[in-house]
Amino acid sequence: MKKVRQIIAIVGVVLLVALYISTLVLAITDNSSTMNMFMASVVATIVVPVMLWIYSSIYKMLKGKDDGNGDDEHSKN
């Protein structure tokens, strides 16, 4: 589970950096459709971290609280 959470975190960081860069570029450029793209980028900057948190929480609930270290109920005698 630790590897999956690390992969989700890395994907989140890459997406956020890409969104921040695109937001900066769209804020600087002057085009007729720039405002719509800028607003989409700002909304995605908020939605992406929330969705990643939800995905990781659902994954944790589905897999249980066991993090793979062998301290589950069956190994205790």
Image: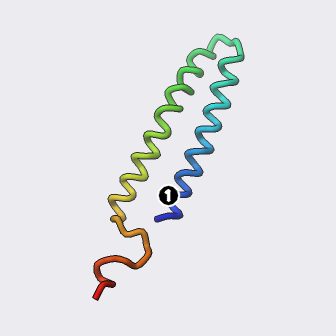
Query: Horizontal and vertical percent for residue 20?
Result: 63, 31
Q: Residue 15: percent from the left, percent from the top?
A: 59, 41
Residue at position x 39%, y 46% in the image: 54
Quadrant of image for the C terminus: bottom left
Q: Is residue 60 above or below residue 27?
A: below
Count up the numbered dots: 1
Q: Which residue: 38% across, 52% down? A: 57
Packing grade of label 1 (10 A; few <14, some 14-19, many >=20) is some
**Residue nearest the observer in this picture, 39 or 10:** 10
Task: Using the image, determine if residue 2 lies above or below residue 19.
Answer: below
Q: What residue do we see at 55% from left, 45% from top?
A: 12
Looking at the picture, does residue 34 appear above or below residue 61?
above
Q: Secondary structure at mark 1?
A: helix
* Amino acid identity at mark 1: Arg
Residue tagged by mark 1?
5
Residue appearing at x 66%, y 29% in the figure: 22
Q: Which residue is outermost to the bottom?
A: 77
Query: Residue 75, how many percent across, how many down?
Result: 33, 84
| Colour approach in the figure | rainbow
